[in-house]
Image (cartoon, grey):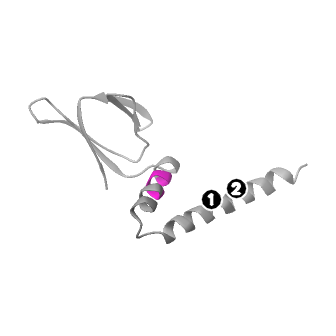
Amino acid sequence: MKNFIPVMMLISVCLLVGFVVLMGSFGGCAKATQTLSHFKSNMIGLDRVITLYSNSGEVIKTWNTRSNIEDQGGSFRFMVDNKAVQISGTVIIEEK
């Protein structure tokens, strides 16, 4: 029973690596690229620039983060410096 957990972890890592390699081999396919991007975003986050705008179009604040962004139906939640940030309004999220 002691060897069961390390073996399962090894199998999980091998499957994960295999999935990433498989998705990388479909680099020209837009859907595969998007799926790989979502996978990477969920696992480690993607470098993003989040900009919040006022009603008149002026920049209120900009964040550079590598965290997951949760869409909460009209507002967005993400982590910056281990602190949760929740914003709503006109927002542009750019992937670097």
Residue type marked 2: Ser
Tell me if residue 31 comes above or below residue 22 in the rendering. above
Query: What distance separates the C-alpha of mark 1 from that of mark 2?
Result: 6 Å
Badge number at residue 16:
1
Between residue 43 and residue 27, name the one nearer to us: 27
Tell me if residue 33 comes above or below residue 87 in the rendering. below
Q: Of helix, strand and loop, which mostly describes the magenta segment?
A: helix
Residue corresponding to mark 2: 12
Provide residue 60's location: percent of width, then percent of height. 18, 33
Residue displayed at 68% across by 63% down: 14
Provide residue 59's location: percent of width, then percent of height. 15, 37
Classify residue 29 by image quadrant: bottom left
Provide residue 20's location: percent of width, then percent of height. 55, 63
Badge number at residue 6:
none
Does residue 39 belong to the magenta stretch? yes
Discs 1, 2 touching: Cβ within 8 Å: yes
Residue displayed at 77% across by 54% down: 8
The quadrant of the picture occupied by the C terminus is: bottom left
The tally of labels here is: 2
Does residue 60 belong to the magenta stretch? no
At mark 1, the secondary structure is: helix
Q: Which residues are magenta?
A: 36-40
Circle 1 packing at 10 Å, graded few (<14), some (14-19), many (20+), is few
Is residue 95 rendered to the left or right of residue 62?
right
Is residue 91 rendered to the left or right of residue 69?
left
